[in-house]
Image: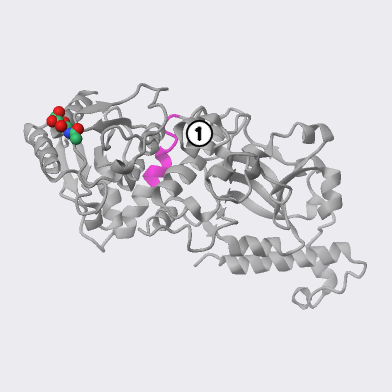
């Protein structure tokens, strides 16, 4: 049976809400909308004993679910929404006064850029406010009448700027959300399950803008969070345009600009940098990774040939993602050939199995299955390396990122650190890698980054692979 469509669910909630408001706030309870008229109105009334709240008033207040929330990835229980503004409701004035600064939780919905670093991006009362229970009662009525969003909601409070992109959606928003949530489940006070969101809400982004051009964000969402919907701006606007108050039972607020308020995010140049000091369970990403692999395999069952050649040798698979058919960020033709030769030599020697692939030639499920079998991923700086999040983590798993010499960005290094691979940056005839806790200072970007003649010495890459695969 198909799940209840969100629009229908919304309508039901809304009508239910209207019934609620009218029943409890009007002096003439019988003037309810026709839709709620039943043959025996008194019986219907009894079926909803809504004037009898079953929980103590204390539990209506908002709690922060973890003591060390990474900026931009905060988790709450009982978070309110009224006329488009998010409210945290505290039991006492003291709690209200000691509530964390909202700039670490969200920002105004503006683009990242020069204007987003200073005070101008800080949230105003339009985005979020902290109220005491008494203040909330005056502003939007008794908290027990708020309509609940059951389960776990993830609210991605960004504008569309970085959403419709595999790396930014999966490597930052989703990885960051799963990581921050896993930090809560790891804490001894919390006995919850791994992140199983009921819905994602993107208040400032329309239906289309979070879907990337390559069309991978959406199938991966289905594979990872079966049944969770992604509700765009239109849905949020409907919530905003009623007088009803809503309450998220549990919600994570994800905000890129807020994450960048953490100095660590600044030094990495990546929002997920704010989570780099967060204590998480070992291989926190693994359950979700396995589920995606399993579900992606199901989605191609019977439709396409099994991916790549079968691996009979049991040797680790080294996959080189070639960009030679793309206009930018390509290797010099002879260096591409040398790299392949050097790697084939390792294959012949029996050290690994080697495959050079052009991802655009494979179906998406095939790409994922190939990555899932790989131990080493070699590629030029680019979105192809986002695929490493589906590669199993092990003592040998390695990402080798080729840059034009002297260029450096942390995108794929920070992914590798988070999902548990050793990362190497290769500059032609040299390479750099960092021990835990250290990284390249700052970023180096220039037009050469996108060169169509990036130099690389195949033997340098082969040397890294040999060394890594010798590790046990
Ligand atoms: C790349 O390395 C080779 C071997 O050391 C060297 O001959 C060549 O000049 C280097 N190329 C660039 C562009 O640095």
> 99 above or below 305?
above
In the picture provided, is 181 more to the left or to the right than 408?
A: right
Residue 404 shows in this picture: yes
Q: Quadrant of ligand 1?
A: top left
In the image, what residue occupies the spot 25% across and 45% down?
A: 451
| Disc 1 within 8 angstroms of ligand 1 (CB) | no
On the image, the x and y values in percent for residue 430 come to 22, 27
Question: Quick one: 429 or 445, which is closer to the camera?
Answer: 445
Say few, some or many: other residues with alpha carbon within 10 Å of mark 1 (under 14 / 14 to 19 / 20 or more).
many
Q: Is residue 255 visible?
A: no
* Snapshot quadrant of residue 456: top left
| Residue to which mark 1 is pinned | 265
Identify the image quadrant of residue 96: top right
Across the whole image, how many numbered discs are drawn on residues? 1
> Is residue 15 or residue 424 the one in the foreground?
424
Magenta part of the protein: which range? 282-291
Q: Position of residue 360 (x, y in %)?
A: 25, 56
Q: Quadrant of the C terminus?
A: top left
Q: Residue at x 65, y 54 (%)?
A: 149
Q: Is residue 233 above or below residue 74?
A: below
Q: Position of residue 370 (x, y in %)?
A: 25, 47
Q: Secondary structure at mark 1?
A: helix
Whether residue 448 is situated above or below residue 25 in the rendered picture: above
> x and y percent of residue 191 in the render?
59, 34
Q: Nearer the viewer, residue 261 or 254?
A: 261
In the rendered structure, the answer to whether residue 433 lies left or right of residue 341 reads: right
């Amino acid at each position: 049976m198909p799940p209840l469509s969100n629009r229908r669910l919304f309508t039901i909630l809304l009508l239910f809400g209207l019934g609620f408001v009218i029943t409890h706030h009007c002096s003439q309870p019988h003037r309810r909308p026709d839709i709620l008229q039943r043959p025996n109105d008194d019986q219907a009334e009894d079926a909803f004993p809504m004037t009898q709240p079953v929980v103590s008033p204390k539990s209506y207040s908002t709690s922060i679910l973890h003591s060390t929330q990474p900026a931009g990835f905060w988790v709450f229980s009982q978070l309110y929404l009224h006329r488009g503004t998010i409210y945290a409701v505290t039991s006492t004035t003291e709690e209200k006064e000691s509530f964390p600064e909202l700039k670490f939780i969200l920002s105004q919905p503006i683009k990242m850029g020069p204007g987003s670093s200073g005070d101008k991006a800080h949230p105003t009362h339009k985005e979020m406010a902290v109220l005491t229970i008494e203040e909330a009662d005056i502003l939007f009525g008794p908290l027990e009448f708020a309509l609940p969003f059951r389960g776990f909601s993830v609210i991605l409070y960004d504008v569309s700027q970085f959403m419709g992109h595999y790396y930014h959606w999966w490597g930052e928003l989703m990885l960051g959300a799963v990581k921050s949530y896993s930090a809560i489940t790891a804490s001894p006070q919390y006995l919850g399950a791994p992140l199983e969101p009921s819905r994602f809400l993107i208040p400032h982004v329309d239906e289309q803008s979070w879907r990337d051009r390559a069309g991978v964000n959406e199938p991966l969402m289905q594979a990872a969070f079966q049944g969770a919907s992604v509700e765009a701006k239109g849905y949020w606007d409907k919530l905003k345009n009623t007088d009803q108050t809503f309450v998220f039972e549990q919600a994570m607020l994800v905000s890129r600009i807020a994450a960048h308020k953490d100095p660590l995010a600044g030094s990495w140049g990546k929002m997920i940098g704010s989570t780099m000091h967060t204590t998480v369970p070992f291989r926190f990403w693994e359950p979700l990774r396995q589920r995606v692999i399993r579900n992606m395999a199901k989605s191609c069952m019977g439709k396409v040939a099994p991916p790549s050649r079968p691996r009979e040798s049991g040797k680790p698979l080294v996959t080189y993602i070639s960009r030679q058919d793309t206009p930018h960020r390509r290797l010099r033709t002879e260096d591409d050939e040398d790299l392949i030769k050097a790697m084939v030599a390792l294959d012949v020697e029996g050290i690994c199995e080697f495959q050079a692939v052009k991802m655009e030639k494979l179906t998406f499920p095939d790409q994922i299955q190939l990555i899932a079998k790989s131990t080493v991923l070699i590629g030029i700086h680019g979105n192809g390396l986002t695929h490493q999040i589906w590669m199993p983590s092990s003592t040998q798993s390695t990402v080798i990122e080729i840059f034009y010499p002297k260029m450096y960005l942390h995108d794929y290094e920070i992914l590798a650190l988070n999902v548990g691979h050793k990362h190497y940056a290769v500059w032609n005839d040299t390479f750099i890698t960092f021990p835990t806790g250290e990284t390249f200072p700052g970023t180096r970007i220039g037009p050469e980054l996108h060169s169509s003649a990036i130099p690389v010495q195949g033997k340098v890459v082969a040397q890294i692979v040999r060394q890594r695969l010798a590790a046990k």
